[in-house]
Amino acid sequence: MPSVTEPTAAFVSGLPKAELHVHLEGTLEPDLKLALATRNGVDIGQSTVEEVRASYAFDSLASFLAVYYPAMDVLVTEQDFYDLATAYFRRAAADGVRHVEAFFDPQAHTTRGVPFETVISGLHRAAADAVGYGLSADLILCFLRDASAESAHETLLAALPYRDLLVGVGLDSDERGNPPAKFAEVFQLARDAGLKLTMHCDIDQVGSIENIRQVLGEVRVDRIDHGTNILEDPALVALVRERRIGLTCCPVSNSFVTADMKAREIVELLGLGVLVTLNSDDPAYFGAYVADTYTAFARQAGVGRDELVQLARNSFEASWLSASERAGYLAEIDAFLEANPA
């Protein structure tokens, strides 16, 4: 069998794509973290960018979260949230991202005394300005699953006055002992408010496949974040294919919290016609924005242009864009391929 030619960096970064699984707090680069700490007089225990970078060390989901949440202490003002999101949008645009549906974790800020309005105002202003970098951006409010369902409900009530600034709600953080069904009621309230639904089903967690069953059955999400353990149940694979439910996979981050990118599983799901997509997750911590993620996946999986193009198409098909907006972005892919023949 002939070897697959690895797509060039120019092709990968030029290929129009959407990013559907990125945590804005996870784009906090060491230099920005240090600058915000200085601006706000927050003692983070590090005084150089190198020291901050060295602190971004972990080997599991739990140890990652133990680094991730304390870093948010530097985010205090509306301008801080604007600067955080703007830095990401600029970087994403350079990677060929044309549309973003980005997560944020309000409870991680409101529990520190930062008002919800401060968080959403800064992020929304950055999302509105992202058109200047050539991309559209929507915001997804994520509930922390290791907080109570009551806290999630309170957060949703705080968010509803800003309903028009949100496209959906999600569920993230530590999955252990926090199944999707715990939040079924608050997610139904969010759906009733017209918001789309997604939930993390992290890879290789205790009860991963049961959690996937719950998000598809009890919660009836519109999308699943991560989710490659679905291959353990062919009936669930058939269900997401039938419903056209996207899976927002993050191969580089997978390799940090387990021993595997899950590249084989992503290729298998792609071959089965599932709407799998590639995303960067928390790129400041995992060292790969979305173009690097595509390249790393192609190298690990041994796939070429055709598969990456299908993944880029899937990213728009799995998005929450309108039909006309989606068609416009898919046409951009066609135009890019015509201008960049194999």
Image: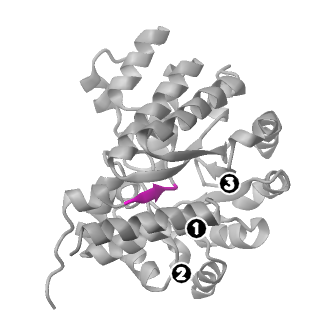
Quadrant assignment for the N terminus: bottom left
Q: Earlier in the sequence, mark 2 or mark 3?
A: 3
Q: Which residue is mark 1?
A: 208
Give the amino acid at mark 1: Ser
- From mark 1 to mark 2, how far is it between C-alphas? 10 Å
Secondary structure, magenta segment, majority class: strand
Give the amino acid at mark 2: Glu
114, 183: nearer the viewer = 114
91, 27: nearer the viewer = 91
x 14%, y 82%: residue: 3
Few, some or many residues within 10 Å of mark 3 (<14, 14–19, 20+): some
* In magenta segment, residue 302: no
Residue 63 in which image quadrant = top left
Residue 266 is left or right of residue 120, and the answer is left
Q: Earlier in the sequence, mark 1 or mark 3?
A: 3
Residue 203, position as x, y percentages in the image: 49, 64
Residue 178's disc number? 3
Q: Which residue is mark 2?
A: 232
- From mark 1 to mark 3, how far is it between C-alphas? 11 Å
